[in-house]
Image (cartoon, rainbow, N blue to C red):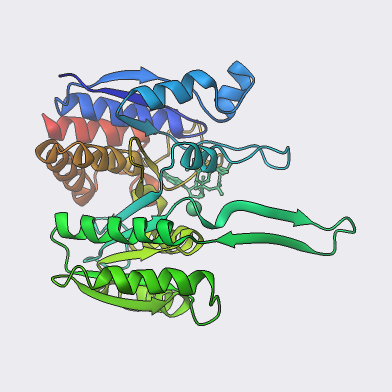
Amino acid sequence: MTITVTVIPGDGIGPDIVDSTVRILNQAGCGFRYEYADAGLTALEKHGELLPHSTLEAIKRNPVTLKGPLTTPVGEGFTSVNVSLRQQFKLYANVRPVISFKGTQARYDNVDILTVRENTEGMYSGIGQTVSDDGLEAEAVSRITRAGAERIVRFAYDLARREGRKKVTAVHKANILKSTSGLFLQVAREIAEQYPEIESNEMIVDAACMRLVMHPQEFDVIVTTNLFGDIISDLCAGLVGGLGMAPGANIGKDCAIFEAVHGSAPDIAGKNLANPSSVILASVQMLEYLGRHQEAQRIVDALAKVIAEGEHTTRDLGGTHGTTEFTEAVIAELG
Ligand code: NAI
Ligand code: MG
């Protein structure tokens, strides 16, 4: 049966790097049908809203969505489209793998870390964001539920088990944030006992940041709450050559959206400079999610080869080429 993928090209560099990815999926013979939909600034300009109903319907209708970065206009009372999507579709798990590819500007050459970030609770729950009338005090509520913590920690261990990974590190700040991070850590310890074949450890977030920079090879799977996961996963992207190499999956019970970790990069939009690897690797995560491991591996191998050869890569990877040339080199490699 042909699978239909909802494709949201997005804003800024989005349309170019999503187009690269669709060309590569086609070249790899994936045989998908694509249903295009708008979101973000592009949707606001075309349809008068950031997240049109037809886009929500398309995401709901098809098993997977491939999405470019979206610009949320700042200071105009708009909620982030990404946050809305995660909440509306209950995409509770944000899975952000980073691996070192030979030929990047990365600091390390043997990093393979999977950050599993809780995507709907914590500091990003959106609850109680107030500023006092005199503008002197501001508040936001961080909310962690036992159910939410259990769901994400279990997800991380199940994924570790499926991928044959050896260790899960729970990252927290339970020494200071005793209620919220405390509950998360308590749940993480309970769940860890149910996976005796996987090594479990825990680390306070600030110490984890230092160790990630100094000894990233010590890490395998990281599971953490929303805000820490947001920050740590960008740090991890930095370990392997930057945001252009970092994909992310937002996974819920009935729906999954695959995207780049980075934003719409307005500074390089429309200049044929963006590295499409982030969305290409997001499509690899999508193929894995669909159980299509061989196609996923073929694309990773082709991408790795082009990056390692270094003759057709983009500026962020130390090359001199554009999005199009890079994409064409990967397509040629796929044969
Ligand atoms: P950004 O991630 O767009 O850019 C940060 C830096 O990384 C820029 O210098 C950019 O040129 C570079 N960069 C990003 N992706 C790259 C790629 N594929 N190849 C080469 N270089 C790349 O972050 P920024 O500028 O803070 O945000 C821009 C917009 O994106 C904002 O409107 C923000 O709200 C939105 N955003 C959207 C996200 C999403 O849709 N998932 C995530 C983060 C930000
Ligand atoms: Mg982020």
Task: Judge whether residue 102 can be spotted in this image.
Answer: no
Q: Is residue 280 above or below residue 215?
A: above
For the residue pair 209 and 326, the one nearer the viewer reads as: 209
Residue 266, given in percent of the width and then of the height, sits at 56, 39
Q: Is residue 278 above or below residue 157?
A: above
Tell me which residue sits at (49%, 23%) in the image. 38
For the residue pair 256 and 188, the one nearer the viewer reads as: 188
The answer to whether residue 195 is left or right of residue 20 is: left
Q: Quadrant of the C terminus?
A: top left
The answer to whether residue 113 is left or right of residue 213 is: left
Q: Is residue 221 above or below residue 320?
A: below
- Most distant residue in the right direction: 134
For the image shown, how many numbered marks are present on the structure? Answer: 0
For the residue pair 35 and 26, the one nearer the viewer reads as: 35
Tell me which residue sits at (67%, 59%) in the image. 140
Q: Quadrant of residue 135?
A: bottom right
Residue 129, given in percent of the width and then of the height, sits at 70, 54
Tell me which residue sits at (36%, 22%) in the image. 61
Q: Quadrant of the N terminus?
A: top left
Tell me which residue sits at (37%, 30%) in the image. 18
Residue 84, given in percent of the width and then of the height, sits at 54, 39
For the residue pair 333 and 71, the one nearer the viewer reads as: 71
Residue 191, given in percent of the width and then of the height, sits at 28, 68
The answer to whether residue 96 is left or right of residue 307 is: right
